[in-house]
Image (tube, rainbow, N blue to C red):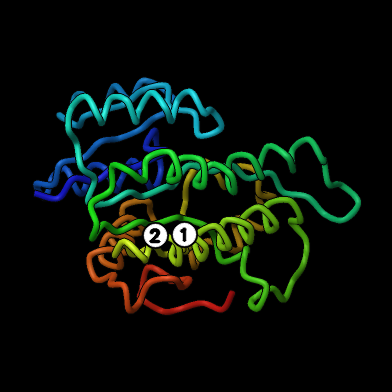
Amino acid sequence: MTVTLIVGADRGIAHAMALALHHRGDTVIAATLGEGADLVAEGVDVVPGFDVTSDDAVAGLSKRLTAEGTVLDRLVHVAGVMFLDGIDTVDFDDARRQFEINTLGPLRTIRGLRDHLADDAKIGIVTSRVGSIGDNGSGGDYAYRISKAGANMVAKNLSIDLGKRGIAVQALHPGTVNTTLLDVMDPSVKEQAKSVLVTPEESAAGLIEVLDGLTLETAGRFQRTNGEFLPW
């Protein structure tokens, strides 16, 4: 049975992934910042109070996995935040927070838990298409773009270092997903984006399919839920 750790499963994409994998019979460990009561009610194993900016939180989860003898077949890091800005409105404190969560969060978590990964494990780091330098044709959103571009480099580096153990790592674009993360968008912009919005459940299904098909040969890249590879 596949054992999957999903980080950031309080709501949205990660929450939908946790439920989908649980319902198909996988063993799911859902790391949540809150209590994750609704996941517990569904029978999902929840690790509450998991803060990706905390070394102590990662160490505590590592200790628990050791005590339980748990080996992870998959680790999916979804936790993230978004604050939108322009060249004149960048808030550097917000930028540092996004970098801490979106970029260093997956590195801290995966580095701290790497000894619990099976030698043929798969890792997905959910970033965003806006972190693609090659795909950037509109500018703006400085802090969020920078943090996600950094997360892409984290994924690429990990794919090389952990690939030596047979572990496949991929940066993943979930699509434009209708979650609370989009609440920071201007309502008129969000209205214009309606035609491309997908539900968390639709995004989760695509991400699961991509991870199901991930191999060492296809790893170390930036991939959409439809399987398409994006430029860095």
Q: Can you say whether 154 is above or below 34 in the image?
A: below
Closer to us: 28 or 114: 114
Q: Residue 133 at x, y = what percent?
A: 67, 72
For the point 91% across and 51% down, which residue is it? 88
Q: Quadrant of the C terminus?
A: bottom right
In the image, taking residue 67 as reference, residue 51 lies left or right, namely: right
Q: Is residue 39 visible?
A: no
Q: Residue 195 at x, y = what percent?
A: 49, 67
Q: Which residue is mark 1?
A: 158
Q: Name, please, the residue furthest toward the front.
A: 164
Give the residue type that dot 2 points to: Leu
Q: Residues within 10 Å of mark 1 (few under 14, many from 20)?
A: many
- Report, in whole angstroms, how far the alpha carbon at label 1 lies from the one at label 2: 6 Å
- Numbered badge on residue 229: none
Q: Which residue is mark 2?
A: 162
For the point 23% across and 42% down, which residue is it? 19
Q: Residue 225 at x, y = what percent?
A: 37, 68
What element does badge 1 sit on? helix
What element does badge 2 sit on? helix
Dot 1 and dot 2 residues touching (CB under 8 Å): yes
Give the residue type that dot 1 points to: Leu
In the image, taking residue 66 as reference, residue 156 lies left or right, namely: right
